[in-house]
Amino acid sequence: MLRFLVLTSLAALVLAELEPEPRYLEDSVERVVGGEVASPNSWPWQISLQYRSGSRYYHTCGGTLIERGWVMTAAHCVDSPRTWRVVLGEHDLYSNSGTEQIIAVSQAYIHPKWDASRLSAGFDIALLRLSTEATLNSHVQLGSLPPSGQILPNNNLCYITGWGRTSTGGSLSSQLKQAYLPVVDHKTCTRSDWWGSTVKTTMVCGGGGAEAGCNGDSGGPLNCLVNGKYYVHGIASFVSGYGCDTPKKPTVFTRVSAYIDWMDSIMV
């Protein structure tokens, strides 16, 4: 039986024995596998979620600005008590370009069915209420959400974006990266030689080859092209413990369209 690993920015905890071996995409210093550096602010809804340690803040996850006062991210990114902030209009984590907006998180709303010890059950979604509303401009825009229940076809064009690891155990890049991760439909992703029963209908798979999400990308968007426009169809959740770009183990995302009603009930 394979180990089910959870990696946070501070510790690695073996929570349970499950098959095949999901692993969180959360870490303070790691990047997107493969892909390329994105043009600055070309994904203007992407945010950097940061936590305070001592007198400094550190990147730990991504997220999506969905309303001027709300950010969508993964539950596992914020299920520990910390002081959080989001940075909007960010491109290079280690330099200030003047486009950034830094806003404190006033409250985190984690899905009530989220259980950190049962990652494969799903519900890896959280909403962050910001202390002040973002100012929308050419560098900061709202991500568009799909209609409730929408399922994309196999091979639909999508990109993952984030500041995550550039290879499993690999080097770091301070700049936002993007990687092409076409949708892998549920029928394929749940085959026994792929993810099997680990992947639920409330999840969406992307990639499965040389490009993938990796630690540090958690909570960030899967941006999918539908009728000429990008919509955020996924929230980066987990990868295989064998490596971020393991063949037939696509990056797994929370399927946003499965949680529209829940989000609407929170953002009233």
Image (cartoon, helix red, strand yellow):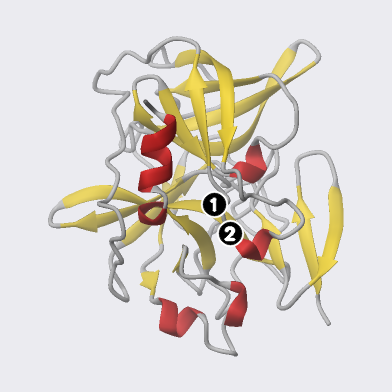
Residue 94 visible to an observer of this rendering:
no
SS category of the residue bearing label 1? loop
Q: Is residue 259 left or right of residue 137?
A: right
Q: Nearer the viewer, residue 190 or 138?
A: 190
Identified at 30% across, 30% down, the residue is 142
The residue pinned by badge 2 equals 122
Horizontal and vertical percent position of residue 195: 59, 78
N-terminal of the pair, mark 1 or mark 2, is 1
Q: To which quarter of the image does residue 163 belong?
A: top right
Residue 3: horizontal and vertical position, in percent? Answer: 82, 71
The residue wearing badge 1 is 32
| Residue at position x 27%, y 50% in the image | 146
Residue 126: x, y in percent? 54, 39
199 on left or right of 54 = left
Is residue 244 something one can see in this rendering? yes
Q: 258 and 169: which one is in front?
A: 258
Q: Quadrant of the C terminus?
A: top left
Secondary structure type for disc 2: loop
Label 1 vs label 2: CA separation? 22 Å
In the image, residue 136 lies at what x, y percent? 28, 18
Residue 78 found in image quarter: top right
Tell me if residue 128 comes above or below residue 31 in the rendering: above
Q: Nearer the viewer, residue 206 or 18?
A: 18
Q: Dot 1, how many residues are within 10 Å of its Cα: few (below 14), some (14-19), or many (20+)?
A: many
Q: Residues within 10 Å of mark 2 (few under 14, many from 20)?
A: many
In this rendering, which labeled residue sits more in front, label 1 or label 2? 2
The residue at 38%/13% (across/down) is 133
